[in-house]
Amino acid sequence: MLFNSLTFLIFFVLVFILHRLMSSWAAQKRLLLLASYLFYAAWNPPYILILLFSTMLDWWLARVIWRCEDDRRRRKLLMLSLLSNLSLLGFFKYGSFLLANFQSALATFGILYQPPAMDIVLPVGISFYTFASLSYTIDVYRREIRGDWSFLDYALFVSFFPHLVAGPIVRAYQLLPQMTVPRRASADQLGWGLVLLVIGLWSKVVMADNIFAPIVDWVYEKPAAYGALDTWSAVLAFAGQIYYDFSGYSLCAIGIALCFGFEFPDNFRHPYAARGFSDFWRRWHISLSTWLRDYLYVPLGGNRSSAWLTQRNLLLTMLIGGLWHGASWMFVLWGGLHGMYLIIERAWRKRLGGRWTLRRNGFADALLTLGTFLVVALTWIPFRAPDWSVLSQVVSGLFRWDVPMRLESMAALVSLVAIAATVRWHFALRDCSLEAEFSRWGTVAQTATVAVCLIAIFLCSGGDERAFIYFQF
Amino acid sequence: MHSSISSSNQRLPSLAWRPILLGAVLMLIAFVAAMELRLAAKGFHPTVTDSEALWQTERARARSLGKRALIIVGASRIQLGLNLEVLRRLTGLEPVQLALDGTNPLSVFEGLARDSNIRGVVLVDYYDFMLAGGTDYSHNYEKRFESLPINYSFPDYAKIESYLSQRWRWMLRSYADGAKPLTTLLIRIFSNATPQYLVTLPNRSRLADYQQVEMPDMYYNRVIRILGGTFERPAQATHTELQRFIESQILKVEPHDDKIFMSQPRLEYLESLIQMIRNRGGQVVFVVMPTSGMARDIERRRYPRSRFWDRLAAQISARTIHFEDFPALRDFVCPDGSHLDYRDQVRFTTALVAAASLERR
């Protein structure tokens, strides 16, 4: 069920009304759990069994790990949780990919291997709920969180519909404690939650789907036919599309959760104003980057050992982070490039040492920010390209200055102005939150902003229904 | 230990939410109302989008209705020509509109014949090129329907969303003809777009109001489309000159090769499809919908009755109705030469039901 659908609107209103009518906290939680499973079943009913299996297994394992005093047994139980969750993820998400690569590897040695087609349908959101669920067993193992939560609380934490299929990846320590205290949204939570929902839908429907997506789709469909101006427009447009699509989903999720009295962590913090790549990853998909940092980079050794090992840990973390997005070498390349940037930046910072004072110099600061944005935008090419052929055609298209522009000039201009305005907006609000900025405005400006978003959503509605990009991850 | 992750809730703005949210919603309502009033004043009507999802829903309904179904297959002529409410009232059957604009009805008819659940009346909008076959988008629609699970009528997310979306569009002129409201605003409100003459109803039938369009320009355009070919249309010709030019082109139209279109194996194949439906207790009726003026002249020259329709009518077991053979059907005038105006729908539907002996018994 998409947030930008009429079905979801009715679903949300019904669940919200029923939730408000119920006085018992346990009944409210049961309602939200039932609604979450219904939300998931709307996509493919049999796959709720996978979600249920993963939930039951981790809930039970965490209880045993929590009670157990024997460190070796606790470690074995944690390994069981990791293995079972990652096996499910591996089978559904990477099964066909691994098989195809195995086939190619054999073919290079002249061995023809033709296994039957696997035809696996990827359960939507499996990467998100697997990571959420794993955070629980790992934290219980580390004794950072209790392991004796009720099944209702735990199942609701894993499946709570605002974050279930495309994040933010809410960690057990962030959401489970909220299950213990009866929650009813305050006026501020409800008001701000609804505003976030409207802004999130505006981001998705107006910006991602109507301003940026057409430019991106045209060029990436036949990249060889377009010249440099068109290709640059599409590359910059995709930077806008992916940001508004995913941050829009996150805003909707945070807003919807607030309407039920729950708080989720921020997932984006003006990422296109980042000064360098480590700063970018503190601002982009924060819930994933912190998850990878806490459960992968730090356990690998982080930056506590030699420079070489730190670089290895960074690269490995980013490669796995890339692969998390999908079973394709394109995502691995994208993750690998970001890993390389982080390594280079780290070395550069170390070399500059105390001379890393760019923040005090406005021009250099703007230059660094724009440079970071440009490299990030170019690095989105492998993320968007379905294969090597499209990737190479888009990259060569960036230099085909002799080919005249084919894109509709007004659409391309609107898209370029929109991405320039986005970068400028991020730059202006770099160290400020959306809440703080919105609060600064007067009531008339606040009302007008929400009204303009609503009117723009209406004007851009009724086209082809596009799923959120992060649904496939 | 976990690093701290700030959340929206920790910095919740404390504002006057009621005036902000109510004010914004009221501004949205005022904007939509203003657009709707302006569109109404310009003569626009709400329509549903004649999408594949809507067609699939109707196709599933045809399957589930059994003997109570009156299934209409064909192209735009029958989609614009029949009033489904009148059909329902006169026949006591449940009409299901499966006609698809600009398509050959054969693919859908084949699908219905092979579908063991189709046991009602099938009304086929016959075109003389029907037996030539070919794969247009109706073929893809039918194939995709056949690939769906048999219980497709179960209300899943896609069906619910399609239904709600159709209902929502049916309420507002801003979505007329499948447009986005932004397109409507720019083209229909801020500039003078062509007036709307076609309305698609939720049951997939269509109303054409030819008083909304420039005549005879539209008529000439339609006839030229039917003529096809690659001749050059005279630039800046008067209506009389254009009429003479088109007439001269019509005189050049040669009959199609009936040996290909009406070969014995093809006729036998069509008869086998008809028999499949009849063996399940169903009925099949082939109808040639009215055409007039130069459009009729082209069809007479291209598909002479004696070599096409009459041979078909003689060789198939289905009931056959050619509008020229029935006094109550022959006098309709198609404003664009090829389709009936909505004002004629009720009278035509009533006459067709009588001609096909489909009255409620």
Image (cartoon, coloured by chain):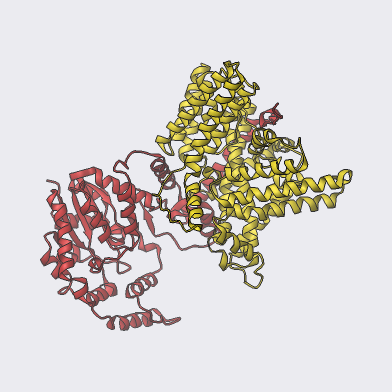
Image quarter of the C terminus of chain A: top right
In the rendered image of this protein, does residue A256 appear above or below residue B303? above
In the rendered image of this protein, does residue A31 appear above or below residue B257? above
> How many marks are shown on the rendered structure?
0
Q: Which residue is more in the foreground, A85 or A368?
A: A85
Q: Quadrant of residue A145?
A: top right
Residue A290 appears in view: yes
Q: Quadrant of residue B228?
A: bottom left
**Among all residues in the image, which is located at the extreme right?**
A354
Residue A311 percent coordinates (x, y): 73, 44
Letter of the yellow chain: A
Q: Residue at x 77, y 42 (%)?
A: A307
In this rendering, position of residue A335 left or right of residue B338: right
Residue B262 percent coordinates (x, y): 18, 71
Image hue for chain B = red
Residue B338 percent coordinates (x, y): 30, 67
Q: Residue at x 27, y 53 (%)?
A: B83
Residue A361 percent coordinates (x, y): 87, 48
In the rendered image of this protein, does residue A345 appear above or below residue A255? below
Q: Which residue is more in the foreground, B257 or A179?
A: A179
Q: Which residue is more in the foreground, B122 or A303?
A: A303
Q: Residue at x 65, y 66 (%)?
A: A228
In this rendering, position of residue A32 left or right of residue B148: right
Q: Quadrant of residue A346?
A: top right
Residue A178 appears in view: no
